[in-house]
Image: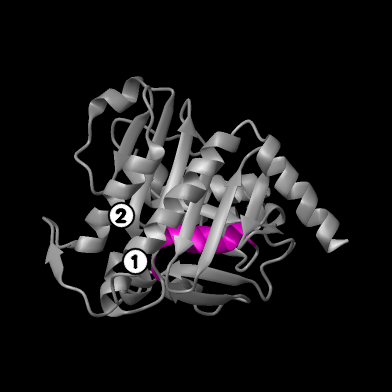
């Protein structure tokens, strides 16, 4: 039965209208593996950009490889490590990537970082791939093909209640005590770096919920959002709208993601933050 299910989803991947995109994503993630093999997390020289965000040689090397393996004529490009070219705004098909989401964790030697590749069509995230070099986990999917986790079919949490649920929180948000209001809930909150990796874990049902209470850029979340959607999960902005991407300003107020049956409970849980986001619009 499991073998039959595997065969079916592999067939869906190959027959997907995004099969070429998925092939490029998988090839790019493979190229990124070779780059990370050259570095040791926790033992790498670090520079700091304006705003004190860290950047390493690995960020830049992976960025170059992703561009080489992914981008084709007529497609747009938005990456954290590439100067933004506004010509992407005129493109229907755009790659939105973060060569190394969770650089702080990478520098600290924590296994909570990843390569994040998102593909957007007419502003809608439709395919994605995420690879965590530390844990050797790979997530790849498209909206008409489902999601593969390490080559096996995956689906998001089927929970219908937050009781006992695992909610992944931003490590930095927890450190700033922004999650104190959730400490006594009926669910477990686990702090973790890399929002892209957290979203990938939700897409594969390895966590039930994740959300961010602070703004994130498109390159942080588009790939993970595409995976959650592709797996059949719930994704929303903090303003309770669908995520649209390739906007002139790529900064989002926040993002929510969960299994399909937790939508209403997740929205109710973060309602105070939703009101704050709406009042700031």
Answer with the quarter of the image where residue 202 lies: bottom right
Figure quadrant of the C terminus: top left
| Mark with earlier residue (1, 2) | 1
Residue at figure coordinates x 73%, y 64% from the top left:
159
Residue depicted at x 79% and y 48%: 8
Confirm whether the magenta stretch covers residue 202. Answer: yes
Q: Label for residue 62?
A: 2
> Going by the image, does 271 lie left or right of 15?
left
Closest to the observer: 212 or 182? 212
Query: Which is more toward the observer, 85 or 8?
Result: 8
* Badge 1 density bin: few <14, some 14–19, many ≥20, Cα 10 Å: some
Pick whichever, 272 or 197, lies toward us: 197
Residue 216 can be seen, yes or no:
no
User: Residue 36 — which label?
Assistant: 1
Characterize the magenta stretch by its predominant secondary structure.
helix
Q: Position of residue 119 (x, y in %)?
A: 47, 38
Circle 1 — which element? helix
Q: How many marks?
A: 2
Q: Which residues are magenta?
A: 193-204
Question: At 52% from the left edge and 75% from the top edge, which residue is drawn?
Answer: 189
Q: Hey, which quadrant is residue 34 in on the image?
A: bottom left
142 versus 108 height, above or below: above
The answer to if 194 sits in the magenta stretch is yes
Colour scheme of the picture: one colour
**Closer to the camera in the image, 11 or 125:** 11
| Labels 1 and 2 touching (C-beta < 8 A) | yes
**Residue 279, image x, y percentages:** 37, 43
Label 2 secondary element: helix
Q: Is residue 61 left or right of residue 8?
A: left
Q: Residue at x 22, y 43 (%)?
A: 82
Residue 124 placement (x, y as % from top left): 51, 33
């Amino acid at each position: 039965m499991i073998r039959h299910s595997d065969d079916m989803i592999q067939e869906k991947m190959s027959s997907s209208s995004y099969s070429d995109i998925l092939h490029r994503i998988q090839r790019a993630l493979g190229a990124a593996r070779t780059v990370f093999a050259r570095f040791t997390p926790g033992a790498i020289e670090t520079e700091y950009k304006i705003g004190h965000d860290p950047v390493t040689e690995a960020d830049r090397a992976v960025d170059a490889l992703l561009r080489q393996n992914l981008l084709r004529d007529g497609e747009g490009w938005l990456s954290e490590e590439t100067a933004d070219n506004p010509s992407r705004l005129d493109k229907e098909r755009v790659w939105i990537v973060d060569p190394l989401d969770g650089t702080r964790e990478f520098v600290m030697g924590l296994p909570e970082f990843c390569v994040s590749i998102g593909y957007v069509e007419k502003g809608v995230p439709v395919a994605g791939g995420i690879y965590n070099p530390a844990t050797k986990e790979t997530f790849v999917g498209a909206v008409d093909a489902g999601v593969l986790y390490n080559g096996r079919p995956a689906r998001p949490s089927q929970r219908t209640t937050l009781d006992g649920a695992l909610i992944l929180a931003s490590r930095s948000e927890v450190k700033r005590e922004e999650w104190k209001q959730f400490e006594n809930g009926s669910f477990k909150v686990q702090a973790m770096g890399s929002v892209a990796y957290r979203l990938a874990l939700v897409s594969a049902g390895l966590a039930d919920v994740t959300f961010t209470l602070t703004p994130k850029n498109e390159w942080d979340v588009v790939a993970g959002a595409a995976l959650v959607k592709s797996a059949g999960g719930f994704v929303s902005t903090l303003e309770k709208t669908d995520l649209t991407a390739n906007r002139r300003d790529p900064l989002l107020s926040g993002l929510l993601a969960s299994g399909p049956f937790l939508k209403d409970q997740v929205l109710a849980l973060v309602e105070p933050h939703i009101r704050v986001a709406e009042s700031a619009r």
